[in-house]
Image: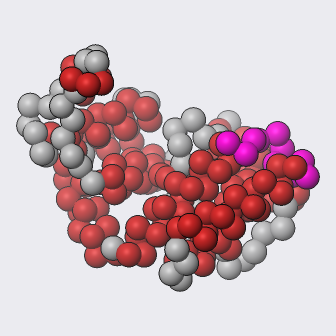
Amino acid sequence: MKKITKIIITAAVISTMNVSALAAELPREAAPVMATEESIIITENLIGNVLTEVQGGLGFGEANAKANNLIRTAVIEGKTNGNGFGMLSAISANSISQYRDMYLRPEYYKQIEEEIKIVIADVITKYANCEVDYITAVKEAYEKIYQTVNPTFDYEEQLNLDTCYRDIPAVNNAKFTVARKLLLEARRQIE
């Protein structure tokens, strides 16, 4: 049922928008957790060419300005199927930021992907086997990543503290992005 719904949404969105065959794909792991598949597809169709430019070296500021202009125009013209600027621009900014970071540090991403695969292997398996939902899997993966810096880190314990008392280890954000990517890939393989 989910596949049919995704296919219908994708077909509806694509039929209402111009799509470039050369446009870069939006990285699903960069989308905010609350983003719907429809809002991701709409954003991808709107800013795919901008993402392609980012892959070629366009800076974040200019790319974000271009993308926001495209999104704003589409929202004003009613071409976003009711999806608002706030969500679409968040998806866009996250995607541009990720592509820009990957452009600047490609070797780092290859290195940490192998590292994170090992660190969160059990979480990937649980998620792929539908033992946990995506939100829980992401939380467990994050905790394991934090534990690579501080083995006693307890996610729940820290989140229950007032923010000024939290002791959350410093971890490169790319590791969390790669963890989400690996989780999403694991689920796609079984669907």
Q: Residue 11: in sight, yes or no? A: no
Q: Which residue is drawn at 68% across and 48% down?
A: 88
Choose top left, top right, bottom left or bottom right for residue 141.
top left
Q: Residue at x 28, y 76 (%)?
A: 107
Q: In this view, does 168 lie to the left or right of 93?
A: left
Looking at the picture, tell me which residue is in the foreground, 110 or 121: 110
Choose top left, top right, bottom left or bottom right for residue 122.
top left
Q: What stretch is highlighted in magenta?
A: 77-86
Does the magenta segment cover residue 88?
no
Choose top left, top right, bottom left or bottom right for residue 70.
bottom right
Q: In this view, does 138 lie to the left or right of 54?
A: left
> Taking 144 as reference, is 171 above or below it?
below
Residue 111 on image: x %, y %: 23, 68
Q: Outermost residue toward the front? A: 164
Q: Residue at x 72, y 77 (%)?
A: 21
Q: Residue at x 31, y 67 (%)?
A: 109
Quadrant (top left/top right/bottom left/bottom right) for the N terminus:
top right
Residue 60 on image: x %, y %: 53, 68
Q: Outermost residue toward the left? A: 151
Main secondary structure type of the part rendered in magenta: loop
> Taking 171 as reference, is 14 above or below it?
below
Residue 99 on image: x %, y %: 48, 67
